[in-house]
Image: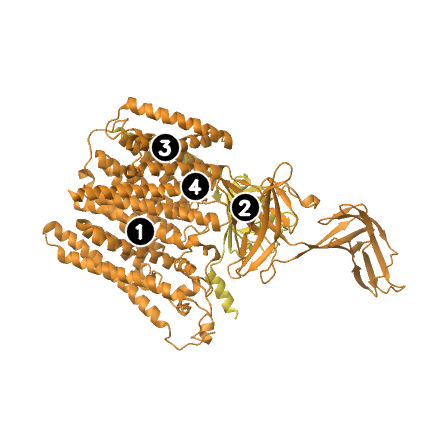
Amino acid sequence: MKKTHIIALVFIAVLVGVLISMLGDFSRYETFDSTYAKKGKEINVVGVLDTSTPMIYEPLKDPNKFIFYLKDEKGGVKEVLYKGEKPRDFERSEKIVITGKLEGEQFVASKILMKCPSKYVEDQVQTASL
Amino acid sequence: MNIYAEGNNMIYGQIGHLLLITTFIAAIASSISYYLAVKKSLQVNNASLWLRAGRNWFIIHAVSAIGVAALLILMIQQHIFEYKYIWQHSSRDLSFKFLLSAFWEGQEGSTLLWMFWHSVLGIILIFKAKKWEAPVMSIVALAQVMLASMELGFNIKVPNIELDFSPFYFAFNWADYKMGSNPFALVKETMDIPVFAMDPNFVFEDGNGLNPLLQNYWMVIHPPTLFLGYALTTIPFAYALSSLWLRNYKDWLQPALEWTLWAVAILGIGILMGGAWAYEALSFGGFWAWDPVENASLVPWMLLVAGLHTLIVYKHTGFSLITTYLFLMAGMWFSLYSSFLTKSGVLGDSSVHSFTDMGMSAQLVISILVFLIPSLWMFIKRYKEIPGRKDEEEVSSREFWVFIGSLIFLVSALHIIIFTSFPVINKVIGSNIAPPDEAHYNSVEIWIAIMLAFGAAVTQFFSFKTTNVKKALKVILSSFSVSIALSIFIIYYFKFYRLDYLLLTVASIYAIIGNGYYWVKTFKGKVLHSGGSVTHIGFGIFLLGILISQGRQHVVSLNKFGINYGESFSAEENAENILLYKDEPQMMSGYRVTYLGDSTALPDIYFKVLYEKLNKKGDVIKSFVLEPHVQINKKMGNVPNPSTYKTIDKDLYTHITTAPLNEDGTPADSLLIESKKLGVGDTIFASRSFAIFESLNPKATTDKIDQRPDDIVVGAKMRLFTMDTNYVIEPKYFIRDLVASSISEGAKDLDVRYSLTKIFPEDGKVEITIEQKLKKFIIMKAIIFPFINLVWLGSIVMFVGVLLSLRKRYAEKGRLNGI
């Protein structure tokens, strides 16, 4: 075997090793009441905005505090605190992915990703009401 | 509503679809003809008939494909809203350059763009490729078949097999499958809107419009450049596969090298333009977010860069041919994979800017397999005969270190693509791993960058084949010590006291110094030979720019004040948004910042923000006005656009996160209404005053109304404190004939009114409501990116460097042809 081959193998072995060792640290898509969430690990929760409880964003008091309620895919609802501005068009989102940790009864989100309905659907609704 | 005669404007779609079918059929015919031309030339020497057929078919194909693109642009420009694509992506108010952006906003348009570039490149190859024309073009034409099939929009029958093992179940039937999505589909064919039942000739007055985020000049040039880059990855692939196919392992190197250089230059600059757009138009505050869509474009580029290096090694030494084949072919595989990631909808939960699923996943997967399987099979079949060297690279040789460098690129590419593919892996094996965040990529890729930069600095000093180690070590060490000395200043200045930051500083400075030194020493600064050195210097500048601008970016709009609201004031460190009232200056990070007012040029609202830099005595030493704006868009939501103050050494970036707007989009005054239950001695805060509830007065009198003896008037005596005075006010609660109302009292000069809105007799408490008219305000975020210009400078230097390498290759070829 040539030493370049050996080096190539070593590189790949290191890559695989690093990958495997990192697998445990990855955050996962979970629901609020999963064991991962309860351990206080960082998780991603996919859900929809729960509109039965109003969102709280009072920029004049604190522009960096936004509270809303998210219903996860299993129907569990939690209060979510995001220390930042309310994302634009939050109400319009059809799906929300939040990343963060459960702290007590509150989920503290570090990242919010929204999926908005495509313009196509939006307009269909609009024209349908003509 | 427009009433038009049936058939009006239908001609566009008919021509368009006819052209699309032509592109598809001509691409198939061209690919087969070229294929036969290759087959025949392997047996007899006269293949010119098939060659000419392939050529003619390709020209028919290319003309139709360019025609399709031109027609679609014409339709967008003419606002023919009968067509879904036109209606969906454009509107009447778009200026011409953004009509181009509308063209490639959708999936059909971006595929068309790719097809357009393949057509152009194909025509160049017909003229330039000479003996490689037939095999290379049969592959390019095949790529066109795959792309054209995605534009057809035909309903076809596909076999559908249902198979299950427990309990055993097998069924076979034919299912409908819509092949591709036709950009010339009509609105009424594709959308189920009730209006068509009433009026079959209904046409939208105006289009849906272009996403305001894409209304940016970078979005005019970034997609065509990027797709030219993607299209260019096909060519080195085609040459590599052709050379395996024809068992010609030598003659393909020169053209493959040129095309790889072009692909690296164009794809690279295309990716960076995307970063420039993200930096200017998006408000996430940066130019790279490790978004899956970005990652997917970076990976083919990395593989081609690795392939470029091993190709040069092979040319000089005869080593590394096998790896070269793999890298160049993988560049194309991953271009296709990246279009799969972007267009299949698989990234739904993990990326903000992927397309939604259009039901084309199967087609996208097939297009990957069509290229992956034959090329891999051919590679394996020829593996044994690919020329190589039996001996080993010297550890002190350049080829050895270039090989290591290309492995580092490979590891980086694999790391990025595996981690980006979690949504795909989840789909396949049913796991639920979330894609990692930016911090993960940064923490791994910084080490890759360190190794690559050191490699780029050191490797040039080794010669191909054998190196005079003593001499090499001398220059390596001398240039290294200069770099260390320079780095110390930078490390100290920016306080990079972290191992990875520290090493990256040294490595990138070393890449600049080392390559500069080598170019001056070895090539005497001759421009002809400067390609590699200039590119590597650019790489060093680029990395240094990333490190400083990202590692030392800081938010200046830290919310260190609080309106005096007491309990609701959060002192979070990451409170990055600042509230500014009109004409009320705030200090932030050495700047006095004042929101001066707004101006409206619909659809844009501009907010004037004055920045004044103060010295220690409080004098203004520099001032400038930034005008971040918000684009009003009722359909897609308002979009803020940052405004950036650029100086040589830093960018001060400002964008609006919230501003109260009226219905029509103009900035609004705001009224804040708030109620609080107070006992005696409790305080209620307004923005510039507060009041303490002192006592309840059951026998209050008022002259605001014509008071009758049987009226009940209760007053809440409150002491109001303003900045410089205090006095008593008495809002009142008033009951006449069982109807209650409030008589509010205002504070002098301050736009605030206090009302007594409820009385709780059981505990003697009251509910006080304050109504304050607030000045106009904005909430904004401001970030400083130090030395971000190094990022752009480094990018340009790299681009120029690659072009210089190309110039050298063309000069070489000229010399060869001259002989």
The one of B793 and B764 positioned closer to us in this rendering = B793
Would you call the spot at circle 2 few (<14 residues within 10 Å), some (14-19), or many (20 or more)? many
User: Which residue occupies the extreme right position in the image?
Assistant: B709
Chain A visual colour? yellow
User: Which residue occupies the extreme top position in the image?
Assistant: B470
Q: Is residue A79 visible?
A: no
Check disc 2 and report the residue beneath it: A32
Residue B231: image tag: 1
- Give me the chain letter of mark 3: A
Q: CA distance from mark 3 to mark 1?
A: 33 Å
What secondary structure is marked by label 2?
Answer: loop
Q: Is residue A72 above or below residue A26?
A: below
Q: CA distance from mark 4 to mark 3?
A: 31 Å
Q: For the residues carrying marks 2 and 3, which lies nearer the camera in this image?
A: 3
Residue type at mark 1?
Answer: Ala
What secondary structure is marked by label 3?
Answer: helix
